[in-house]
Amino acid sequence: MPEEPCQCPDCQRFYREHDRLIRENPSLRQQQELNWAALQSFRTLAGRVLEELQKQHGEGEPSSPPAATESGAQAVAGGGSPDSDAIQQAMADLENINAHLFSIEALMERIFDVRVPEPVEQTFREVAGELAPDPLNADRLRLNRLLHQTPDLPDHRGG
């Protein structure tokens, strides 16, 4: 028996978004463009936030570190506050994210080299309809009503 999909709110939100993206972008070309736009928007936003943090908090280079023998209280008094450390760590993490996104971009450029004939694009659209049918489709709504009336489904146990 296949494992049931997770029913937590985060997973349910993911499933809805996943299906929506397939429904709204059912061809190879649309998926290529969607993923490129998502990658570019992620890089733009992460890069701009990093620039803002660098303006506000410096380039991420720590001030002279306290001697190893000093106590933690002295380190905090010396400018190494937990908030400052968290910001510096976030800046380092954003730099890493941007580097990874740049690498993904280089790989994705290869995806754009792929072109498929119209019959293959039609197959993409057909499979998309099977993977993520329109949730407002009359048949889908009837099926959902029937499923929700079934007492042996996991979400109806113990309720």
Image: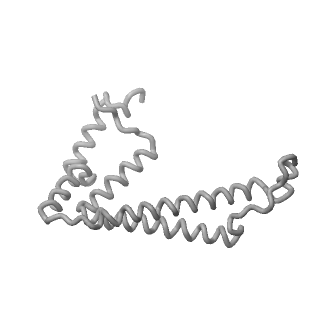
Seen from the viewer's position, the closer of residues 22 and 107 is 107
Q: Can you give x and y, in whole percent of width and height, for residue 15 in the image?
A: 36, 48
Seen from the viewer's position, the closer of residues 154 and 141 is 154
Residue 47, compared with residue 1, is above or below; it is below
The total of numbered circles placed on residues is 0
Question: What residue do we see at 40% from left, 65% from top?
Answer: 106
Q: Can you give x and y, in whole percent of width and height, for residue 27 in the image?
A: 23, 62
Residue 121: image quadrant is bottom left
Q: Can you give x and y, in whole percent of width and height, for residue 115 in the image?
A: 21, 66
Residue 70, compared with residue 58, is above or below; it is above
Q: Is residue 63 left or right of residue 112?
A: right
Question: What residue do we see at 37% from left, 66% from top?
Answer: 36
Residue 76, compared with residue 55, is above or below; it is above
Seen from the viewer's position, the closer of residues 110 and 80 is 110
Q: Can you give x and y, in whole percent of width and height, for residue 114 in the image?
A: 24, 64
Q: In this view, does 125 lie to the left or right of 14?
A: left
Question: What residue do we see at 42% from left, 26% from top?
Answer: 158
Say which quadrant the C terminus sits in.
top left
Residue 36, compared with residue 138, is above or below; it is below
Say which quadrant the N terminus sits in.
top left
Q: In this view, does 117 lie to the left or right of 23?
A: left
